[in-house]
């Protein structure tokens, strides 16, 4: 597996709608979806957030397009928008998480000889997560999740990439280069407006299973769940 996460990834959060789904993740059963699902979700609901009409699509605004003939202007065209995607991407399997580093944690107080830190969320944030993404949140130790994915790849011979999503403004040259490269980089590129989601993504180079489930092996040793509204109650002691 390509271990291309940031070295400081510490926690992965997965929001789900039901307690049964949260327990399923503790058992290692990740619910995946395809790029096409997320594109269709925005088109069907009209909301950008969990849905993204540009998922795995390179959108470029084209200005001042001119056709030349013998180095002289021949035709000038109106401004346009180009959209590029690969059909074979539409059935691939992706699972998304919110990733937090130690630097993302907020100092809370001292307790005897230890420092207490809290997650960087307000009650309003948690209400938004609960309403938008799911009433329950599974909290997973990031490095342990990465090791579990690596074991899954070794046992199944299915290529897995677990990596931080990078966010770009429109018409970014770097984004164009990464999208066009002969790698899987395009699966980890999104519009800048989604940056607050702090997404880490597990990409599986396989078609999405009919039941959407990827069983990577138990995560019970490195995860637990709670209601999303209670995330502000969690404290880490150092």
Image: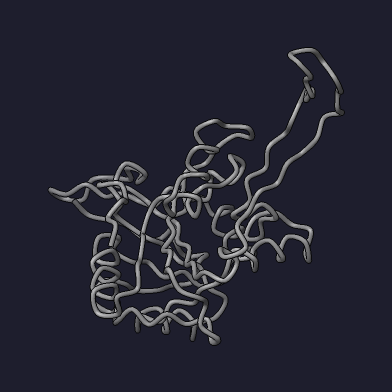
Q: Residue drawn 57% across and 32% down?
A: 172
Q: Residue drawn 33% across and 78% down?
A: 216
Question: Residue 167's spot in the image, x, y percent?
Answer: 52, 41
Q: Residue drawn 21% across and 50% down?
A: 111
Residue positioned most to the front: 70
- Would residue 181 appear left or right of 143 to someone viewing this image? right
Question: Residue 203's spot in the image, x, y percent?
Answer: 43, 64
Between 44 and 93, the one lying in front of the other is: 93
74, above or below 238, in the image: above
**Quarter of the rendering occupied by the N terminus:** bottom left
**Residue 144 position by quadrant:** bottom left
**Residue 171 position by quadrant:** top right
Between 85 and 33, the one lying in front of the other is: 85
211, above or below 98, in the image: below
- Would residue 87 appear left or right of 177 to someone viewing this image? right
Between 90 and 115, the one lying in front of the other is: 90
Residue positioned most to the top: 72
- Would residue 80 appear left or right of 206 to someone viewing this image? right
Q: Residue drawn 57% across and 69% down?
A: 34
Question: Residue 107's spot in the image, x, y percent?
Answer: 32, 42
């Amino acid at each position: 597996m390509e271990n291309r996460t940031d070295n400081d990834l510490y926690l992965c959060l997965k929001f789900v709608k039901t307690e049964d789904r949260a327990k399923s993740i503790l058992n290692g059963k990740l619910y995946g979806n395809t790029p096409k699902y997320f594109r269709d979700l925005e088109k069907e609901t009209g909301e950008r957030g969990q849905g993204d009409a540009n998922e795995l699509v390179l959108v470029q605004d084209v200005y001042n397009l001119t056709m030349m003939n013998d180095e002289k202007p021949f035709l000038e065209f109106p401004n346009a928008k180009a959209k590029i995607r690969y059909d074979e991407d539409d059935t691939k399997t992706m699972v998304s998480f919110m990733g937090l580093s130690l630097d993302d944690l907020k100092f809370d107080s001292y307790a005897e000889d230890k420092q207490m830190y809290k997650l960087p969320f307000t009650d309003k944030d948690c209400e938004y997560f609960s309403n938008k993404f799911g009433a329950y949140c599974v909290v997973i130790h990031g490095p342990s999740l990465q090791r579990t994915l690596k074991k899954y790849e070794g046992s199944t011979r299915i290529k897995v990439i677990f990596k931080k999503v990078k966010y770009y403004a429109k018409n970014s040259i770097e984004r164009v280069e990464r999208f066009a490269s002969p790698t899987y980089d395009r699966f980890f590129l999104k519009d800048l407006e989604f940056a607050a989601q702090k997404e880490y993504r597990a990409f599986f180079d396989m078609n999405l299973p009919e039941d959407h489930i990827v069983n990577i092996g138990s995560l019970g040793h490195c995860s637990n769940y709670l209601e999303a509204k209670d995330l502000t109650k969690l404290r880490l002691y150092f």
